[in-house]
Image: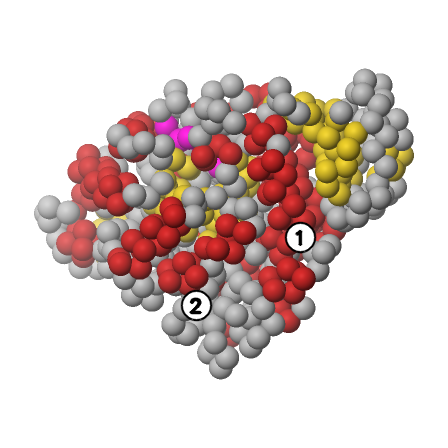
Amino acid sequence: MTNFKWWQTSIIYQIYPRSFQDSNNDGIGDIPGIIKRLDYLREIGIKSIWISPFYPSPMKDFGYDISDYKGIHPIFGIMKDFDRLLDEAHKRDIKIIIDLVPNHTSDQHPWFLESRKSKDNPYRDYYIWKDSKKNGKEPNNWLSYFGGSAWEWDRETQQYYLHQFVKEQPDLNYANPKVLKEILDIIDFWLAKGVDGFRVDVICNMWKHPDFPNNPKNPKWTKKLPPFEKYLMKYNVNQPEVHAIVRKMRKVLDKYKDRVLIGETYLPYKGLLEFYGNNDECHLPFNFHLLGVKWKAPAIKKKVNDYEKILPENCWPSYVLGNHDQKRIATKIGSEKQARIANMLLLTLRGSPTVYYGEEICMKNVKIPKSLIQDPPALNQPDVADIVGRDPERTPMQWDDSPNAGFSAKGVKTWLPLAKDYKTNNVEIQKTQSNSMLALFKSLTKLRSEYSCLNSGKYKYIPTAQKDIFAYLRYDKNNTILVVLNFSQKFFKLDLSKKLPEKNGKLLLASDLEEHHSTQLSSLNIKAHLGLIIEIE
Ligand code: NOJ
Protein backbone atom coordinates (compact mmCIF):
# COMPACT_ATOMS: atom_id res chain seq x y z
CA MET A 1 0.00 0.00 0.00
CA THR A 2 1.53 3.26 -1.01
CA ASN A 3 0.68 6.87 -0.33
CA PHE A 4 -1.95 6.04 2.21
CA LYS A 5 -1.60 7.56 5.65
CA TRP A 6 -1.76 5.50 8.82
CA TRP A 7 -5.10 7.07 9.76
CA GLN A 8 -6.58 5.94 6.46
CA THR A 9 -5.63 2.32 6.83
CA SER A 10 -5.78 1.67 10.54
CA ILE A 11 -8.77 0.92 12.70
CA ILE A 12 -9.38 3.56 15.37
CA TYR A 13 -10.13 1.87 18.69
CA GLN A 14 -11.77 4.11 21.27
CA ILE A 15 -10.76 3.64 24.89
CA TYR A 16 -12.91 5.14 27.60
CA PRO A 17 -10.10 5.23 30.15
CA ARG A 18 -12.25 4.95 33.29
CA SER A 19 -13.50 1.58 32.06
CA PHE A 20 -10.66 -0.14 30.24
CA GLN A 21 -8.19 -1.43 32.83
CA ASP A 22 -7.66 -0.50 36.46
CA SER A 23 -4.02 -0.93 37.51
CA ASN A 24 -4.13 0.41 41.08
CA ASN A 25 -7.40 -1.11 42.24
CA ASP A 26 -9.35 2.04 42.91
CA GLY A 27 -12.17 0.77 40.69
CA ILE A 28 -11.38 3.23 37.89
CA GLY A 29 -9.32 2.48 34.78
CA ASP A 30 -6.07 4.36 34.25
CA ILE A 31 -3.14 4.96 31.91
CA PRO A 32 -0.86 2.21 33.28
CA GLY A 33 -3.85 -0.07 32.70
CA ILE A 34 -3.95 0.91 29.05
CA ILE A 35 -0.21 0.19 28.77
CA LYS A 36 -0.80 -3.27 30.21
CA ARG A 37 -3.28 -4.01 27.42
CA LEU A 38 -1.29 -2.69 24.45
CA ASP A 39 -0.16 -6.18 23.52
CA TYR A 40 -3.76 -7.33 23.44
CA LEU A 41 -4.66 -4.42 21.14
CA ARG A 42 -1.77 -5.28 18.88
CA GLU A 43 -2.83 -8.91 18.87
CA ILE A 44 -6.33 -8.04 17.67
CA GLY A 45 -4.98 -5.84 14.91
CA ILE A 46 -5.43 -2.35 16.38
CA LYS A 47 -2.97 0.25 15.19
CA SER A 48 -4.43 3.42 16.59
CA ILE A 49 -6.28 4.25 19.77
CA TRP A 50 -8.32 7.29 20.70
CA ILE A 51 -8.46 7.89 24.42
CA SER A 52 -11.29 9.91 25.96
CA PRO A 53 -10.13 12.69 28.34
CA PHE A 54 -7.65 11.89 31.12
CA TYR A 55 -6.91 15.50 32.14
CA PRO A 56 -7.39 17.03 35.60
CA SER A 57 -11.11 17.47 36.04
CA PRO A 58 -13.73 17.71 38.78
CA MET A 59 -15.42 14.88 36.83
CA LYS A 60 -18.81 16.55 36.55
CA ASP A 61 -18.93 15.11 33.04
CA PHE A 62 -16.36 12.38 33.61
CA GLY A 63 -13.40 14.25 32.19
CA TYR A 64 -15.13 16.34 29.53
CA ASP A 65 -14.97 19.15 32.09
CA ILE A 66 -11.28 19.98 32.08
CA SER A 67 -9.55 22.15 34.68
CA ASP A 68 -6.00 21.80 33.29
CA TYR A 69 -5.43 21.00 29.61
CA LYS A 70 -1.76 20.17 30.06
CA GLY A 71 -1.97 17.74 32.94
CA ILE A 72 -3.11 14.24 33.89
CA HIS A 73 -5.80 13.55 36.49
CA PRO A 74 -4.20 11.62 39.38
CA ILE A 75 -6.84 8.88 39.09
CA PHE A 76 -5.43 8.15 35.61
CA GLY A 77 -1.76 8.48 36.57
CA ILE A 78 0.95 11.09 36.12
CA MET A 79 2.58 12.67 33.08
CA LYS A 80 5.37 10.07 33.22
CA ASP A 81 2.73 7.39 32.73
CA PHE A 82 1.40 9.19 29.68
CA ASP A 83 4.91 9.55 28.25
CA ARG A 84 5.44 5.85 28.82
CA LEU A 85 2.13 5.10 27.11
CA LEU A 86 3.23 7.08 24.06
CA ASP A 87 6.53 5.32 24.03
CA GLU A 88 5.18 1.82 24.51
CA ALA A 89 2.42 2.34 21.98
CA HIS A 90 4.80 3.70 19.37
CA LYS A 91 7.17 0.78 19.97
CA ARG A 92 4.28 -1.46 18.95
CA ASP A 93 3.42 0.71 15.98
CA ILE A 94 0.21 1.92 17.65
CA LYS A 95 -0.73 5.58 17.25
CA ILE A 96 -2.22 7.64 20.06
CA ILE A 97 -5.10 10.03 19.42
CA ILE A 98 -6.25 12.15 22.34
CA ASP A 99 -9.44 14.04 23.05
CA LEU A 100 -9.42 17.80 22.70
CA VAL A 101 -12.30 19.63 24.38
CA PRO A 102 -12.18 23.20 23.09
CA ASN A 103 -15.86 24.17 23.38
CA HIS A 104 -15.95 24.42 27.17
CA THR A 105 -13.79 24.07 30.25
CA SER A 106 -14.60 23.08 33.80
CA ASP A 107 -15.92 25.86 36.01
CA GLN A 108 -12.85 25.10 38.12
CA HIS A 109 -10.46 25.99 35.31
CA PRO A 110 -8.33 29.01 36.36
CA TRP A 111 -9.71 30.98 33.38
CA PHE A 112 -13.28 30.60 34.64
CA LEU A 113 -12.37 31.19 38.28
CA GLU A 114 -10.95 34.53 37.11
CA SER A 115 -13.74 35.21 34.65
CA ARG A 116 -16.48 34.99 37.25
CA LYS A 117 -14.68 37.33 39.67
CA SER A 118 -15.90 40.56 38.06
CA LYS A 119 -17.18 42.05 34.85
CA ASP A 120 -13.88 43.79 34.21
CA ASN A 121 -11.64 40.82 34.95
CA PRO A 122 -9.21 40.25 32.03
CA TYR A 123 -10.63 36.72 31.67
CA ARG A 124 -14.28 37.83 31.64
CA ASP A 125 -14.42 37.56 27.84
CA TYR A 126 -12.96 34.07 27.80
CA TYR A 127 -16.54 32.93 28.40
CA ILE A 128 -19.97 33.95 27.18
CA TRP A 129 -21.64 36.28 29.66
CA LYS A 130 -24.96 38.00 28.97
CA ASP A 131 -27.35 40.24 30.83
CA SER A 132 -30.74 38.83 31.70
CA LYS A 133 -33.79 39.88 29.76
CA LYS A 134 -35.70 42.77 31.28
CA ASN A 135 -37.90 40.31 33.15
CA GLY A 136 -34.85 38.64 34.67
CA LYS A 137 -35.14 35.60 32.39
CA GLU A 138 -32.38 33.87 30.43
CA PRO A 139 -31.02 35.75 27.38
CA ASN A 140 -32.62 33.21 24.99
CA ASN A 141 -34.29 29.77 24.85
CA TRP A 142 -31.17 27.68 24.24
CA LEU A 143 -31.23 24.36 26.06
CA SER A 144 -28.40 22.40 27.60
CA TYR A 145 -27.81 18.94 26.13
CA PHE A 146 -27.91 17.71 29.70
CA GLY A 147 -31.23 19.20 30.73
CA GLY A 148 -32.71 22.62 31.43
CA SER A 149 -31.60 26.01 30.19
CA ALA A 150 -28.13 26.51 28.74
CA TRP A 151 -27.78 29.65 30.87
CA GLU A 152 -26.72 29.85 34.49
CA TRP A 153 -27.24 32.93 36.62
CA ASP A 154 -24.20 34.22 38.48
CA ARG A 155 -25.35 36.06 41.55
CA GLU A 156 -22.01 37.71 42.27
CA THR A 157 -21.68 39.49 38.95
CA GLN A 158 -25.37 39.61 38.01
CA GLN A 159 -25.06 38.04 34.57
CA TYR A 160 -25.81 34.70 32.93
CA TYR A 161 -23.09 32.50 31.44
CA LEU A 162 -23.63 29.96 28.68
CA HIS A 163 -23.09 26.24 29.18
CA GLN A 164 -24.26 23.82 26.50
CA PHE A 165 -23.59 20.87 28.81
CA VAL A 166 -23.69 20.82 32.65
CA LYS A 167 -23.53 24.16 34.40
CA GLU A 168 -20.01 23.28 35.55
CA GLN A 169 -18.94 23.27 31.86
CA PRO A 170 -19.03 26.94 30.81
CA ASP A 171 -18.68 27.55 27.06
CA LEU A 172 -15.56 29.34 25.87
CA ASN A 173 -15.95 32.50 23.82
CA TYR A 174 -14.26 32.20 20.42
CA ALA A 175 -15.25 35.75 19.55
CA ASN A 176 -12.30 36.57 21.79
CA PRO A 177 -9.17 35.73 19.75
CA LYS A 178 -7.19 35.07 22.93
CA VAL A 179 -9.25 31.92 23.53
CA LEU A 180 -8.26 30.31 20.25
CA LYS A 181 -4.63 31.25 20.89
CA GLU A 182 -4.77 29.37 24.19
CA ILE A 183 -6.31 26.31 22.56
CA LEU A 184 -3.78 26.32 19.71
CA ASP A 185 -1.02 26.43 22.29
CA ILE A 186 -2.54 23.37 24.00
CA ILE A 187 -2.67 21.54 20.67
CA ASP A 188 0.97 22.38 20.07
CA PHE A 189 1.93 21.19 23.56
CA TRP A 190 0.58 17.68 22.96
CA LEU A 191 1.83 17.43 19.40
CA ALA A 192 5.33 18.34 20.57
CA LYS A 193 5.04 15.52 23.09
CA GLY A 194 4.39 13.15 20.24
CA VAL A 195 0.67 12.47 20.18
CA ASP A 196 -0.52 11.44 16.74
CA GLY A 197 -3.74 13.39 16.61
CA PHE A 198 -6.88 14.70 18.22
CA ARG A 199 -10.53 13.87 18.29
CA VAL A 200 -12.17 17.26 18.73
CA ASP A 201 -15.17 17.27 21.04
CA VAL A 202 -18.37 18.99 19.77
CA ILE A 203 -16.33 20.70 17.08
CA CYS A 204 -19.52 22.15 15.50
CA ASN A 205 -20.53 23.99 18.67
CA MET A 206 -17.57 26.29 19.13
CA TRP A 207 -19.04 29.31 17.36
CA LYS A 208 -22.41 30.80 18.29
CA HIS A 209 -24.52 33.21 16.29
CA PRO A 210 -23.36 36.67 17.43
CA ASP A 211 -26.96 37.86 18.03
CA PHE A 212 -27.85 34.86 20.17
CA PRO A 213 -31.37 34.52 18.69
CA ASN A 214 -33.93 32.06 20.05
CA ASN A 215 -33.77 28.62 18.46
CA PRO A 216 -36.88 27.53 16.53
CA LYS A 217 -39.14 24.78 17.85
CA ASN A 218 -38.53 21.27 16.53
CA PRO A 219 -41.86 20.25 14.93
CA LYS A 220 -40.78 16.58 15.03
CA TRP A 221 -40.08 16.44 18.75
CA THR A 222 -41.83 13.69 20.72
CA LYS A 223 -41.40 12.41 24.25
CA LYS A 224 -39.26 9.60 22.88
CA LEU A 225 -36.54 12.13 22.09
CA PRO A 226 -34.24 13.81 24.61
CA PRO A 227 -35.70 17.08 25.98
CA PHE A 228 -32.94 19.24 24.44
CA GLU A 229 -34.25 18.29 21.00
CA LYS A 230 -37.43 20.33 21.63
CA TYR A 231 -35.67 23.12 19.78
CA LEU A 232 -33.61 22.89 16.62
CA MET A 233 -30.07 23.90 17.37
CA LYS A 234 -30.03 26.45 14.64
CA TYR A 235 -27.97 29.21 16.20
CA ASN A 236 -25.58 27.40 18.54
CA VAL A 237 -24.41 24.60 16.26
CA ASN A 238 -22.65 24.51 12.90
CA GLN A 239 -22.33 28.24 12.27
CA PRO A 240 -20.21 28.95 9.17
CA GLU A 241 -17.64 30.85 11.22
CA VAL A 242 -16.59 27.65 12.99
CA HIS A 243 -14.57 26.60 9.94
CA ALA A 244 -12.04 29.40 10.36
CA ILE A 245 -11.33 28.06 13.86
CA VAL A 246 -10.87 24.52 12.59
CA ARG A 247 -8.50 25.75 9.87
CA LYS A 248 -6.33 27.39 12.50
CA MET A 249 -6.25 24.15 14.47
CA ARG A 250 -5.29 22.20 11.39
CA LYS A 251 -2.46 24.62 10.68
CA VAL A 252 -0.84 23.68 13.98
CA LEU A 253 -1.13 19.99 13.11
CA ASP A 254 0.37 20.57 9.71
CA LYS A 255 3.58 21.84 11.32
CA TYR A 256 4.13 18.24 12.37
CA LYS A 257 4.42 15.10 10.29
CA ASP A 258 1.49 12.75 9.79
CA ARG A 259 -0.88 13.91 12.53
CA VAL A 260 -4.63 13.56 12.32
CA LEU A 261 -7.51 15.88 13.15
CA ILE A 262 -10.83 14.12 13.72
CA GLY A 263 -14.04 16.04 14.34
CA GLU A 264 -17.05 15.00 16.38
CA THR A 265 -19.54 15.92 13.69
CA TYR A 266 -23.14 14.83 14.13
CA LEU A 267 -24.22 16.33 10.80
CA PRO A 268 -25.99 15.47 7.56
CA TYR A 269 -23.55 14.52 4.79
CA LYS A 270 -23.52 17.98 3.28
CA GLY A 271 -22.45 19.49 6.59
CA LEU A 272 -19.88 16.73 7.10
CA LEU A 273 -18.27 17.54 3.79
CA GLU A 274 -17.76 21.12 4.84
CA PHE A 275 -15.61 19.95 7.75
CA TYR A 276 -12.99 18.57 5.35
CA GLY A 277 -12.58 22.16 4.14
CA ASN A 278 -10.22 22.46 1.28
CA ASN A 279 -8.02 19.77 2.72
CA ASP A 280 -7.30 22.29 5.45
CA GLU A 281 -9.79 21.34 8.18
CA CYS A 282 -10.48 17.85 9.58
CA HIS A 283 -8.80 14.85 8.01
CA LEU A 284 -11.74 12.83 9.26
CA PRO A 285 -15.03 14.38 10.25
CA PHE A 286 -16.63 11.42 12.03
CA ASN A 287 -19.49 9.93 10.03
CA PHE A 288 -22.11 8.87 12.58
CA HIS A 289 -24.81 7.90 10.12
CA LEU A 290 -24.54 4.18 10.92
CA LEU A 291 -25.42 5.03 14.53
CA GLY A 292 -28.74 6.65 13.78
CA VAL A 293 -29.86 4.39 10.94
CA LYS A 294 -32.60 1.77 11.27
CA TRP A 295 -30.79 -1.59 11.21
CA LYS A 296 -32.31 -2.75 7.91
CA ALA A 297 -30.41 -3.36 4.69
CA PRO A 298 -32.24 -0.79 2.52
CA ALA A 299 -31.55 2.04 4.97
CA ILE A 300 -27.92 1.03 5.43
CA LYS A 301 -27.30 0.61 1.69
CA LYS A 302 -28.70 4.08 1.14
CA LYS A 303 -26.53 5.60 3.83
CA VAL A 304 -23.36 4.04 2.43
CA ASN A 305 -24.17 4.74 -1.22
CA ASP A 306 -25.19 8.35 -0.59
CA TYR A 307 -21.95 8.92 1.30
CA GLU A 308 -19.85 7.27 -1.42
CA LYS A 309 -21.60 9.42 -4.01
CA ILE A 310 -21.17 12.72 -2.28
CA LEU A 311 -17.57 12.33 -1.07
CA PRO A 312 -15.02 13.90 -3.41
CA GLU A 313 -11.92 11.85 -4.08
CA ASN A 314 -9.70 13.82 -1.72
CA CYS A 315 -12.02 13.29 1.24
CA TRP A 316 -11.41 10.07 3.14
CA PRO A 317 -14.49 8.25 4.51
CA SER A 318 -15.12 7.46 8.16
CA TYR A 319 -17.56 5.03 9.75
CA VAL A 320 -18.47 4.77 13.42
CA LEU A 321 -20.56 2.00 15.00
CA GLY A 322 -20.37 2.97 18.63
CA ASN A 323 -18.93 5.33 21.20
CA HIS A 324 -19.27 6.36 24.84
CA ASP A 325 -22.43 8.37 24.10
CA GLN A 326 -24.34 5.70 22.15
CA LYS A 327 -26.08 2.42 22.84
CA ARG A 328 -23.81 -0.53 22.16
CA ILE A 329 -24.51 -2.03 18.76
CA ALA A 330 -25.63 -5.50 19.94
CA THR A 331 -28.12 -3.84 22.30
CA LYS A 332 -29.33 -1.42 19.69
CA ILE A 333 -30.06 -4.07 17.12
CA GLY A 334 -30.97 -6.75 19.65
CA SER A 335 -29.05 -9.59 18.04
CA GLU A 336 -25.56 -10.96 18.48
CA LYS A 337 -25.64 -12.44 15.00
CA GLN A 338 -26.44 -9.06 13.55
CA ALA A 339 -23.67 -7.52 15.68
CA ARG A 340 -21.34 -9.80 13.69
CA ILE A 341 -22.76 -8.41 10.46
CA ALA A 342 -22.27 -4.92 11.87
CA ASN A 343 -18.59 -5.56 12.55
CA MET A 344 -18.13 -7.16 9.16
CA LEU A 345 -19.70 -4.14 7.53
CA LEU A 346 -17.64 -1.68 9.54
CA LEU A 347 -14.35 -3.40 8.80
CA THR A 348 -14.95 -3.90 5.09
CA LEU A 349 -16.40 -0.57 3.99
CA ARG A 350 -14.10 1.97 2.39
CA GLY A 351 -12.71 4.35 4.99
CA SER A 352 -11.40 4.52 8.53
CA PRO A 353 -13.52 2.46 10.94
CA THR A 354 -13.90 3.48 14.58
CA VAL A 355 -14.51 0.68 17.07
CA TYR A 356 -15.62 1.29 20.65
CA TYR A 357 -13.83 -0.80 23.29
CA GLY A 358 -15.59 -4.08 24.02
CA GLU A 359 -17.38 -4.27 20.68
CA GLU A 360 -14.86 -6.92 19.65
CA ILE A 361 -16.34 -9.24 22.27
CA CYS A 362 -19.90 -8.07 21.76
CA MET A 363 -20.32 -6.24 25.06
CA LYS A 364 -23.84 -5.02 25.65
CA ASN A 365 -25.46 -2.16 27.50
CA VAL A 366 -25.72 -2.88 31.20
CA LYS A 367 -28.83 -1.88 33.12
CA ILE A 368 -27.68 0.45 35.88
CA PRO A 369 -29.76 0.46 39.08
CA LYS A 370 -31.08 3.94 39.88
CA SER A 371 -28.91 4.28 42.95
CA LEU A 372 -25.75 3.72 40.90
CA ILE A 373 -26.44 6.15 38.05
CA GLN A 374 -23.52 8.54 37.53
CA ASP A 375 -24.06 10.21 34.19
CA PRO A 376 -25.11 13.89 34.50
CA PRO A 377 -27.87 13.96 31.84
CA ALA A 378 -29.51 10.95 33.54
CA LEU A 379 -29.10 12.39 37.04
CA ASN A 380 -30.46 15.79 35.95
CA GLN A 381 -33.43 14.26 34.14
CA PRO A 382 -34.51 11.17 36.08
CA ASP A 383 -37.79 10.87 34.14
CA VAL A 384 -35.93 10.29 30.88
CA ALA A 385 -32.82 8.61 32.32
CA ASP A 386 -33.41 5.60 30.05
CA ILE A 387 -33.29 7.79 26.94
CA VAL A 388 -30.43 10.09 27.87
CA GLY A 389 -28.24 8.05 30.25
CA ARG A 390 -24.86 6.86 28.98
CA ASP A 391 -23.63 4.76 31.90
CA PRO A 392 -24.99 1.52 30.35
CA GLU A 393 -22.44 1.67 27.49
CA ARG A 394 -19.54 2.66 29.74
CA THR A 395 -19.21 -0.37 32.02
CA PRO A 396 -15.83 -2.01 32.74
CA MET A 397 -14.15 -4.05 30.03
CA GLN A 398 -14.71 -7.79 30.45
CA TRP A 399 -11.26 -9.35 30.34
CA ASP A 400 -11.76 -12.66 32.12
CA ASP A 401 -14.02 -14.55 34.51
CA SER A 402 -12.23 -13.61 37.74
CA PRO A 403 -14.03 -11.40 40.27
CA ASN A 404 -14.25 -7.95 38.64
CA ALA A 405 -13.52 -9.47 35.25
CA GLY A 406 -9.79 -8.74 35.30
CA PHE A 407 -10.64 -5.03 35.18
CA SER A 408 -10.02 -4.51 38.93
CA ALA A 409 -8.92 -6.88 41.66
CA LYS A 410 -11.30 -8.98 43.74
CA GLY A 411 -13.24 -7.00 46.31
CA VAL A 412 -12.80 -3.61 44.64
CA LYS A 413 -15.97 -1.61 43.99
CA THR A 414 -15.77 -0.68 40.34
CA TRP A 415 -17.02 2.80 39.37
CA LEU A 416 -19.84 1.28 37.34
CA PRO A 417 -21.13 -2.27 37.82
CA LEU A 418 -19.91 -5.03 35.56
CA ALA A 419 -22.16 -6.76 33.09
CA LYS A 420 -23.85 -9.77 34.66
CA ASP A 421 -22.71 -11.99 31.80
CA TYR A 422 -19.01 -11.25 32.20
CA LYS A 423 -18.17 -14.76 33.43
CA THR A 424 -19.27 -16.22 30.13
CA ASN A 425 -18.56 -13.25 27.89
CA ASN A 426 -15.00 -12.04 28.19
CA VAL A 427 -11.77 -11.80 26.26
CA GLU A 428 -10.10 -14.88 27.76
CA ILE A 429 -13.06 -17.15 27.05
CA GLN A 430 -13.53 -15.82 23.56
CA LYS A 431 -9.85 -16.41 22.83
CA THR A 432 -10.48 -20.12 23.35
CA GLN A 433 -13.64 -20.26 21.21
CA SER A 434 -12.95 -20.73 17.54
CA ASN A 435 -16.28 -19.15 16.53
CA SER A 436 -16.42 -16.24 18.99
CA MET A 437 -16.97 -12.61 18.09
CA LEU A 438 -13.35 -12.00 19.05
CA ALA A 439 -12.22 -14.69 16.62
CA LEU A 440 -14.30 -13.03 13.91
CA PHE A 441 -12.92 -9.60 14.78
CA LYS A 442 -9.34 -10.89 14.63
CA SER A 443 -9.99 -12.60 11.31
CA LEU A 444 -11.41 -9.36 9.95
CA THR A 445 -8.43 -7.27 11.03
CA LYS A 446 -6.09 -9.94 9.66
CA LEU A 447 -7.86 -9.83 6.30
CA ARG A 448 -7.51 -6.04 6.30
CA SER A 449 -3.79 -6.41 6.79
CA GLU A 450 -3.45 -9.03 4.06
CA TYR A 451 -5.66 -7.50 1.39
CA SER A 452 -4.80 -3.93 0.50
CA CYS A 453 -8.13 -3.56 -1.32
CA LEU A 454 -9.96 -3.73 2.01
CA ASN A 455 -8.05 -0.71 3.28
CA SER A 456 -7.39 1.44 0.30
CA GLY A 457 -9.31 -0.16 -2.53
CA LYS A 458 -12.36 1.22 -4.26
CA TYR A 459 -15.97 0.45 -3.37
CA LYS A 460 -18.64 -0.74 -5.78
CA TYR A 461 -22.23 -1.42 -4.87
CA ILE A 462 -23.69 -4.64 -6.32
CA PRO A 463 -27.49 -4.42 -6.59
CA THR A 464 -29.30 -7.69 -5.98
CA ALA A 465 -32.94 -8.70 -6.20
CA GLN A 466 -33.07 -9.10 -2.42
CA LYS A 467 -33.70 -5.97 -0.45
CA ASP A 468 -32.36 -7.56 2.75
CA ILE A 469 -28.98 -8.29 1.21
CA PHE A 470 -26.23 -5.72 0.97
CA ALA A 471 -23.51 -6.76 -1.50
CA TYR A 472 -20.46 -4.77 -2.58
CA LEU A 473 -17.00 -5.11 -4.00
CA ARG A 474 -13.76 -3.80 -2.63
CA TYR A 475 -11.04 -3.88 -5.24
CA ASP A 476 -7.67 -2.58 -6.30
CA LYS A 477 -5.09 -3.66 -8.85
CA ASN A 478 -4.13 -6.66 -6.73
CA ASN A 479 -7.44 -8.16 -5.70
CA THR A 480 -11.21 -8.01 -5.82
CA ILE A 481 -13.27 -8.94 -2.81
CA LEU A 482 -17.02 -9.46 -2.68
CA VAL A 483 -18.85 -8.80 0.58
CA VAL A 484 -22.39 -10.16 0.95
CA LEU A 485 -24.31 -9.33 4.12
CA ASN A 486 -27.71 -10.66 5.11
CA PHE A 487 -29.48 -8.22 7.43
CA SER A 488 -32.48 -10.47 7.94
CA GLN A 489 -33.45 -13.84 9.34
CA LYS A 490 -34.46 -15.12 5.93
CA PHE A 491 -32.53 -17.53 3.75
CA PHE A 492 -31.62 -16.39 0.23
CA LYS A 493 -30.26 -18.14 -2.82
CA LEU A 494 -28.42 -15.46 -4.69
CA ASP A 495 -27.36 -15.47 -8.31
CA LEU A 496 -24.67 -12.87 -8.89
CA SER A 497 -23.37 -14.38 -12.14
CA LYS A 498 -24.95 -11.65 -14.25
CA LYS A 499 -23.36 -8.93 -12.16
CA LEU A 500 -19.96 -10.57 -11.91
CA PRO A 501 -18.53 -12.35 -14.95
CA GLU A 502 -16.31 -14.57 -12.80
CA LYS A 503 -17.88 -17.90 -11.92
CA ASN A 504 -16.31 -18.69 -8.65
CA GLY A 505 -14.61 -17.24 -5.69
CA LYS A 506 -12.60 -18.25 -2.70
CA LEU A 507 -14.19 -17.97 0.72
CA LEU A 508 -12.06 -15.69 2.87
CA LEU A 509 -14.36 -15.38 5.84
CA ALA A 510 -17.91 -16.08 6.96
CA SER A 511 -19.51 -14.30 9.89
CA ASP A 512 -20.29 -17.65 11.54
CA LEU A 513 -16.63 -18.66 10.98
CA GLU A 514 -17.72 -21.87 9.23
CA GLU A 515 -15.76 -22.90 6.18
CA HIS A 516 -18.29 -24.96 4.23
CA HIS A 517 -20.14 -22.13 2.44
CA SER A 518 -20.32 -22.48 -1.31
CA THR A 519 -18.76 -19.66 -3.31
CA GLN A 520 -20.28 -20.31 -6.71
CA LEU A 521 -21.47 -16.87 -7.75
CA SER A 522 -24.50 -18.21 -9.60
CA SER A 523 -25.89 -19.85 -6.46
CA LEU A 524 -24.75 -18.38 -3.22
CA ASN A 525 -26.60 -19.76 -0.22
CA ILE A 526 -26.99 -16.99 2.25
CA LYS A 527 -28.56 -18.23 5.44
CA ALA A 528 -30.12 -15.98 8.09
CA HIS A 529 -27.80 -13.31 9.51
CA LEU A 530 -24.88 -14.52 7.43
CA GLY A 531 -22.08 -12.43 6.05
CA LEU A 532 -19.56 -13.71 3.52
CA ILE A 533 -16.29 -12.27 2.29
CA ILE A 534 -15.25 -13.87 -0.98
CA GLU A 535 -12.19 -13.27 -3.07
CA ILE A 536 -13.17 -13.16 -6.72
CA GLU A 537 -10.73 -15.12 -8.80
C1 NOJ B 1 -19.38 15.02 23.49
C2 NOJ B 1 -18.76 13.90 24.26
O1 NOJ B 1 -18.63 12.78 23.44
C3 NOJ B 1 -19.65 13.66 25.47
O2 NOJ B 1 -19.31 12.48 26.14
C4 NOJ B 1 -19.54 14.86 26.36
O3 NOJ B 1 -20.42 14.70 27.46
C5 NOJ B 1 -19.91 16.13 25.61
N1 NOJ B 1 -19.34 16.19 24.31
C6 NOJ B 1 -19.45 17.34 26.37
O4 NOJ B 1 -18.06 17.46 26.31
Q: Quadrant of residue 74?
A: bottom left
The rendered magenta stretch, by its main secondary structure, is classed as loop
Asked if residue 297 is positioned above or below residue 362 in the image, the reply reads above
- Crowd around label 2: few <14 · some 14–19 · many ≥20 (10 Å): many
Q: Is mark 2 within 8 Å of ligand 1?
A: no
Q: Is residue 180 left or right of residue 277?
A: left
Q: Quick check: can you spot residue 445?
A: yes
Colour scheme in use: secondary structure
Query: Going 43% across and 48% down the picture, which residue do you hit?
Result: 92
Q: Earlier in the sequence, mark 1 or mark 2?
A: 2
Residue that carries the numbered disc 1 in the rendered image:
439
Q: Is residue 449 left or right of residue 33?
A: right
Magenta segment: 281-286
Residue that carries the numbered disc 2 in the rendered image:
22
Asked if residue 394 is positioned above or below residue 305 in the image, the reply reads below
Query: Going 57% across and 56% down the picture, which residue do you hit?
Result: 358
Q: Quick check: can you spot residue 163?
A: no
Q: Quadrant of residue 253?
A: top left
Q: Position of residue 424 (x, y in %)?
A: 67, 68
Asked if residue 296 is positioned above or below residue 161 in the image, the reply reads above
Q: Furthest-bottom residue in view?
A: 411
**Amino acid carrying mark 1 in the image:** Ala
Q: Position of residue 531 (x, y in %)?
A: 75, 41
Q: Position of residue 326 (x, y in %)?
A: 55, 51
